[in-house]
Image (spheres, helix red, strand yellow):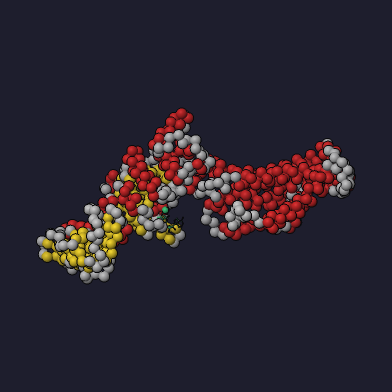
Amino acid sequence: MSDGTYIRRPNRPLQIYAVIFLIVLYVPVLFIPMFSFNDSIYVRFPLQGFTLQWYGELWTREPVWNALWNSVKVGLVVSVISTVLGVVAARAITRYRIPGKGTMVTFIMMPLVIPGIIFGVALLVLLSRMGVPLSLYTVGLGHLIICLPFGVATLLPRFEGFDPSMEEASADLGENGWWTFWRVTFPMVFPGVVASLLLTFTISFDEFIMAFFLTGTDPTLPMYIWGQLRFPQEFPSVLALSALILFVSFFLVFVAQRLGRAGLDNGNT
Amino acid sequence: MTSSDAFISIRNVNKFFGGFQAIDDVSMDIGKGEFFSLLGASGCGKTTLLRMLAGFESTSSGEILIDGQPTADVPPHHRPVNMVFQSYAIFPHLNVRDNIAYGLRKQRLPKAKRQEMVEEMLDLIKLPGYGTRKANELSGGQRQRIALARALILRPKVLLLDEPLGALDKQLREQMQLELRALQRQVGITFVFVTHDQEEALTLSDRIAVMSGGKVLQVDTPHGLYEAPRTREVASFIGNMNFFPATVRRNGASAGAVETEGLGTIPVPLDILTKPDGAPVQVALRPEKFALSDTRPDGALAVQARLSTSAYLGERSHHYVTIDGREEPVAVSTPNLHRLAGDDAGTGAPVWLSWTPESIVILDAE
Ligand SMILES: Nc1ncnc2c1ncn2[C@@H]1O[C@H](COP(=O)(O)OP(=O)(O)O)[C@@H](O)[C@H]1O
Ligand SMILES: [Mg+2]
């Protein structure tokens, strides 16, 4: 303990706890990529040898590509809409004196803690009552509800760490609201916008429960995986697909996290 | 100042935030090319008034004219004024050059011309070669100068400055005061400068508006505010002041005097006596208008006093003396003209307290 202050000194039990926590969290997940390279259709030890066969099969399968394309379409639209709404909401929350602001924020954040199954069922009932046919649009609507709080939560700290006199200075120097937004506000919150896009895209891309209730005839990728689980011989391909989704998601969220904090730590005054 | 050469006219302006009145019936005129300060304690409404000039706050009633034009419907980005914000508001995503050139977009200048203007500004604020620095590589004093350059490059008719030196340390602040004053003379733009530091206001300004609780108490030159404050509040806000309850004495049409508690009867010219005979007033005297001596000085007005405490401050010494007929001690400040060795009179020593009738200010009674 020669180095480090009282607060910063290493804490052995805490370190052990953190390591165990990470192992428990990620080891089960790591079985998926491991078995996806296993040369056997049975998921069991001992491993049989290395193969790329399951990945190759995925490549040639039409429905996988269709499902992937469906997920990307929904993910792109949902991420753009929830990020735009997130920017508007975060700006309104931090800039204006709105009565009942706290309550409003609570309601925006609520979907984070309400089980997806409740929202899914509720939306399904509502949409079928209104006679709206299930399609990728209804899936997108469900995903929007889930993604919006993540967008707002990513963007809020950006706007909170933003001196309101920056925008006033721009107006003072002759720019109207439109130009002020594009020359000052947007560049300053840009990393947050990218982070929000990546995060909400990933959440939509991986989402299952809403899609389960609201999908019509076009499945998203998680729905496709769910459908394939009935066929034991398809299981290794499902593992391969899951492994791919896992890596892409991890990468996107990692980048989003880095961007979301960029510039906030070092004197963004 | 007559209203014909007023460049900014503030007429009966009020500002309410909900039920709270931040600005209370303020009227004043600011001349072209003037260095004009708004001086007052924190929360008295200085920033609010400045923001109304910039267009960030509307007036609840009354009007503001800039260069003869009513401003009520003019948004901030169309006003011929620029502001240096208290936080400086330097854009963090732009370098120094782009910060300074920010307001030039609409002028559609060739790149070379714009570059030249920025370089000129960098020279003016004594930061040549800083064009490519990032905003977060600048010190407080440098940010302050960039904010100044960013506003001045647009050649505004009025520059508004909200406590621009408040965030700087004492030494830098004093240096920047001199530079700011020199810069204002050089560019000849009207400056409206907000500060809570009375010394800063006195040093820099052509005229000062002293504010309190949303009201303007007095608008005057530094000399006028110091030597002829109109109310007790102004008198005690600017420097120190001793107040003596007094009564007006008029001896026919020829001579006048005020009879004070503690300083005896002081003859004053009739023309500064506005009150009738017997009216209660206050006589105010700054500490440095008094002199202390061991023997009764010839010709001056004097009373016998006792030294209560003395503090040696280098250039000057501050003393408190007590006099008969007055409980509160009198503050006296004397220059240390000679190098004296150990002749400081001890506590309770008798001294003569003297002053001249010209140095007194007569104020209304409380
Ligand atoms: N937007 C606002 N809403 C409500 N009250 C405000 C607002 N702006 C300023 N005030 C109040 O008006 C008073 C004057 O504020 P300000 O002009 O900032 O004072 P100063 O700059 O002299 O310190 C303060 O009491 C402040 O709380
Ligand atoms: Mg202020």
Identify which residue, B177 or A60, lies in the foreground: B177
Q: In the picture, residue A63 is in which quadrant?
A: top right
Q: How many marks?
A: 0
* Percent position of residue A206, x then y: 74, 47
Q: Is residue B38 left or right of residue A193?
A: left
A18 w.r.t. A81: above or below: below
**Quadrant of the drawing holding the N terminus of chain A:** bottom right
Identify which residue, B192 or A85, lies in the foreground: B192
Q: Residue at x 80, y 44 (%)?
A: A33
Q: Residue at x 50, y 41 (%)?
A: B137
* Percent position of residue A97, x then y: 52, 56
Q: In the picture, residue B279 is in which quadrant?
A: bottom left
Identify which residue, B165 or A222, lies in the foreground: B165
Residue A63 seen in the current view: no
Residue B329 seen in the current view: yes
| Picture quadrant of ligand 1 | bottom left
Q: Residue at x 80, y 47 (%)?
A: A32
* Percent position of residue B282, x then y: 24, 64
Q: Residue at x 22, y 71 (%)?
A: B325
Q: Is residue B130 left or right of residue B265?
A: right
Q: Is residue B303 left or right of residue A23?
A: left
* Percent position of residue B27, x then y: 33, 53
Q: Is residue B340 left or right of residue B16?
A: left
Identify which residue, B338 or A105, lies in the foreground: B338
